[in-house]
């Protein structure tokens, strides 16, 4: 029996050129996906940074308002105490 010569042509019609073309297409799609992901990550980061900044500004404003309110209440309380002490002294005289 004579041996059949083996061909280097893969079954199902796949050739090196077809495989190489598929590889290049897959590589292109992966690069596009990576670019989309990087762009979305950057956009997400910008949104988060903006929200953190807004939150920080709100927190600072609330703290300032709270401090001003506390100072105002302390001043009013001190003035009231001084007024009551003065009135008390005047009654005692």
Image: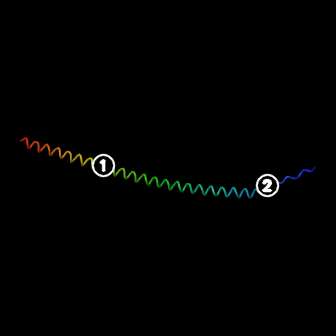
- The residue located at (92%, 51%) in the rendering is 2
Colour pattern of the rendering: rainbow
Q: Secondary structure at mark 1?
A: helix
- Res. 26 image quadrant: bottom right
User: In this rendering, would 58 be left or right of 29?
Assistant: left
- The residue located at (43%, 53%) in the rendering is 51
Cα separation, mark 1 vs mark 2, equals: 78 Å
Q: Secondary structure at mark 2?
A: helix
User: In this rendering, would 54 be left or right of 77?
Assistant: right
26 and 13: which is toward the camera: 13
Q: Position of residue 18 (x, y in %)?
A: 74, 58
- The residue located at (27%, 47%) in the rendering is 70
Q: Position of residue 52 (x, y in %)?
A: 43, 51
Q: Position of residue 59 (x, y in %)?
A: 36, 50
Against 43, residue 93 (above or below) is above
Residue placed under numbered mark 2 in the picture: 11
**Residues under numbered marks 1 and 2 in contact, where contact means CB atoms less than 8 Å apart:** no
The mark that comes first in sequence, 1 or 2, is 2
42 and 82: which is toward the camera: 82
User: In this rendering, would 10 be left or right of 27?
Assistant: right
Q: Quadrant of the C terminus?
A: top left
The circle drawn on residue 66 is 1
Crowd band around label 2 with a 10 angstrom C-alpha radius: few (<14), some (14–19), many (20+):
few
**Among all residues in the image, which is located at the extreme left?**
93
**Among all residues in the image, which is located at the extreme top?**
92
- The residue located at (49%, 53%) in the rendering is 45
Q: Position of residue 55 (x, y in %)?
A: 40, 52
Crowd band around label 1 with a 10 angstrom C-alpha radius: few (<14), some (14–19), many (20+):
few
């Amino acid at each position: 029996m004579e041996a059949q010569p083996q061909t280097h042509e893969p079954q199902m019609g796949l050739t090196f050129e077809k495989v190489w073309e598929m590889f290049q297409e897959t590589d292109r799609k992966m690069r596009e996906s990576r670019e989309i992901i990087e762009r979305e990550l950057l956009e997400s980061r910008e949104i988060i940074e903006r929200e953190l900044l807004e939150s920080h500004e709100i927190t600072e404003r609330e703290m300032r308002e709270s401090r001003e309110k506390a100072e105002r209440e302390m001043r009013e309380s001190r003035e009231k105490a001084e007024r009551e002490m003065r009135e008390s002294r005047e009654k005692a005289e």
